[in-house]
């Protein structure tokens, strides 16, 4: 198995790395959208984080990686096969699936073999990218250039957590719960608001502008390419420490207390910036809770709401033609008004 660049060794891009860590601790946040330049480590960060996570337990023989601990989310095949008998399990790496721009609908959602179904009376289903990504990461580069019908598919599946394939009266339904990570350059095309709203967090990455950071990025990449095993071994201690931090955060997440005052401030912040709907404050509170879990805090503090607010809200604001400052500046201004300088 090819070595993956260590997550801890990624230089800079702290905002993107934090957003990915938060999404890993609480996948219900809804994924991460990353805007910015090419070659800034976006796909590397996603693969590195997935490699950092411990292998997940799946039901043996299941094409969708059903979790043996959550029978209510099993696919139809697992429910039928294990209705009464014991479940055999195995451990597999957390999947990272790339969704190319030119992918056909059948490749994304899966394909039903109608000929086999009619001839032999069995549902022959070829799982697609959504099936492979279940319980892992689905990465879409240049998501703003994705065809409209694929955007509609992603919106539906992201909302329901299930993929339904129907052909000529036959249907197959399977779980499709994943952390959706998209990347793109706004200058190359706008992202449909319906899809953008499905991303829990949105961050911007830029090419490092200072010489020491750029130099360090190049040095670490060259060292990794020269001797991958040695480079990974050198960063193993840091990655192990981060892995333990994630696991502890996931375990303590349900017990994190969210004070009423924090919920009120989150709602006031969303009101002040004019965020559409209630998804903004729900995401903001969930992200602040996940950040508290990562930091080992038993109670969500105001500081965590303030820290994660730009990533949770900037992409949810309507454009104001009378305000040339942009959504980031509007959120930062509202944060200062509510929380102080």
Image: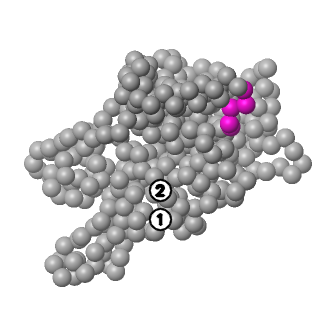
Vertically, is 298 above or below 148? above
Is residue 317 highlighted in magenta?
Answer: no
Q: Nearer the viewer, residue 100 or 66?
A: 100
| Lateral position of residue 274 relative to residue 30, left or right | right
Report the residue that reaches farthest toward the left: 85
The local secondary structure at tag 2 comes to loop
For residue 275, side relative to residue 249 (left or right): right
Picture residue at 62% right of the left edge, 60% below the top: 145
Q: Secondary structure at mark 1?
A: loop
Q: Residues within 10 Å of mark 2 (few under 14, many from 20)?
A: many
- Tag on residue 5? none
Residue 113 in view (yes/no): yes
Quadrant location of the C terminus? top right
Question: Magenta segment, which residues?
Answer: 206-210
What type of secondary structure mainly makes up the magenta span? loop
Residue, disc 2: 99
Q: Could you say which disc has been placed on residue 103 in the image? A: 1
At x 48%, y 27%, the residue is 223
Residue 271's x, y, as percent? Answer: 73, 39
> Does the residue at mark 2 contact the one at mark 1 (Cβ under 8 Å)?
yes
- Across the whole image, how many numbered discs are drawn on residues? 2
CA–CA distance in space, label 2 to label 1: 7 Å
Residue 86 screen position, x and y as percent? 11, 44
**Residue drawn at 19 percent across, 73 percent down:** 122
State the image coordinates of residue 174 (x, y, percent, origin top left).
Answer: 33, 58
Q: Is residue 69 above or below residue 151?
A: above
């Amino acid at each position: 198995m090819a070595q993956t660049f260590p997550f801890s060794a990624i230089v800079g891009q702290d905002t993107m790395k934090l957003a990915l860590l938060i999404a890993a601790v609480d996948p219900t946040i809804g994924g991460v959208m990353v805007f910015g330049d090419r070659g800034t480590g976006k796909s590397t960060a996603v693969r590195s984080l997935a490699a950092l996570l411990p292998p997940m337990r799946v039901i043996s023989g299941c094409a969708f990686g059903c979790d043996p601990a959550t029978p209510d989310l099993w696919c139809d095949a697992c429910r039928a096969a294990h209705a009464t008998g014991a479940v055999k399990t195995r451990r597999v790496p957390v999947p990272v699936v790339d969704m190319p721009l030119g992918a056909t609908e059948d490749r994304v959602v899966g394909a039903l073999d109608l000929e086999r179904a009619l001839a032999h009376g069995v549902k022959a289903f070829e799982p697609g990218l959504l099936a492979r990504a279940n319980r892992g990461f689905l990465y879409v580069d240049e998501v703003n250039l994705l065809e409209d019908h694929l955007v509609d598919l992603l919106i539906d599946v992201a909302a329901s957590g299930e993929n339904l394939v129907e052909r000529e009266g036959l249907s197959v339904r399977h779980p499709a719960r994943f952390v959706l990570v998209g990347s793109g350059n706004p200058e190359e095309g706008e992202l449909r608001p319906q899809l953008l709203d499905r991303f829990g967090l949105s961050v911007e990455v830029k090419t490092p502008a200072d010489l020491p950071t750029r130099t360090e990025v190049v040095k670490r990449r060259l060292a990794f390419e020269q001797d991958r095993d040695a480079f990974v071994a050198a960063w193993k201690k840091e990655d192990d420490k981060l892995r333990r931090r994630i696991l502890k955060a996931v375990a303590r997440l349900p017990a994190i207390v969210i004070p009423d005052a924090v919920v009120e401030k989150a709602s006031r912040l969303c009101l002040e910036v004019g965020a559409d709907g209630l998804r903004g404050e729900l995401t903001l509170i969930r992200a602040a809770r996940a950040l508290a879990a990562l930091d080992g805090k038993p109670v969500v503090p105001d500081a965590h709401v303030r820290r994660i607010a730009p990533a949770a809200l900037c992409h949810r604001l309507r454009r104001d033609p009378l305000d040339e400052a942009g959504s980031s500046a509007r959120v930062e201004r509202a944060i200062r008004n509510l929380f102080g300088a």
